Image (cartoon, helix red, strand yellow):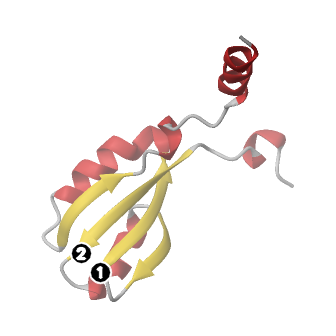
Amino acid sequence: MATPEQTIPQPRTGIAVWLYSAKQARKLRRYGLVYYVSERMKYVVLYVDSANAEATVQQLQKQRFVRSVSVSPHGTIATEYAHQLIGERKEDDD
């Protein structure tokens, strides 16, 4: 039986990997979870642990079949907008 420490999900980072050929998408399984493969546009969406994201990006950039690598900005985008709405309401009241 799993302990509560094992069931807590780890923070993940999304990485878009652009390839020269979609055939090499299977090789990316060793780096993380392959979430989506676009054979027509030749890219792969890959999820890795946030703690290992930078090291994984560097390893991917060294591969011959990788055209480019970009990290998702999802973790840095603000998702709380309540304070912005309150500020706008105060300006409207004036």
- The answer to whether 57 appears left or right of 5 in the picture is left
Q: Report how far apart the C-alphas of labels 1 and 2 lie in the structure.
A: 5 Å
Dot 1 falls on a residue whose secondary structure is loop
- In percent of the image, x 41 and y 43: which residue is there? 52
Q: How many marks?
A: 2
Q: Residue at x 42, y 79 (%)?
A: 37
Which quadrant holds residue 5?
top right
Q: The residue tagged with tag 2: helix, strand or loop? A: strand
Q: As drawn, which residue projects farthest toward the top? A: 94
Please rate how many residues cluster around mark 1, counting C-alpha atoms within 10 Å: few if below 14, some from 14 to 19, many from 20: some
Q: Which x, y percent locates residue 4?
A: 83, 41
Residue type of the residue flagged with mark 1: Lys
From the top left corner, tell me how far across and down residue 83 is, in percent: 69, 21
* For the residues bearing labels 1 and 2, Cβ distance under 8 angstroms: yes
In x, y percent, where is residue 55? 30, 44
Pointer 1: what residue?
42
The N terminus - image quarter:
bottom right
Residue 64 percent coordinates (x, y):
12, 70
Which label sits on residue 19? Answer: 2
Q: Amino acid at mark 2?
A: Leu
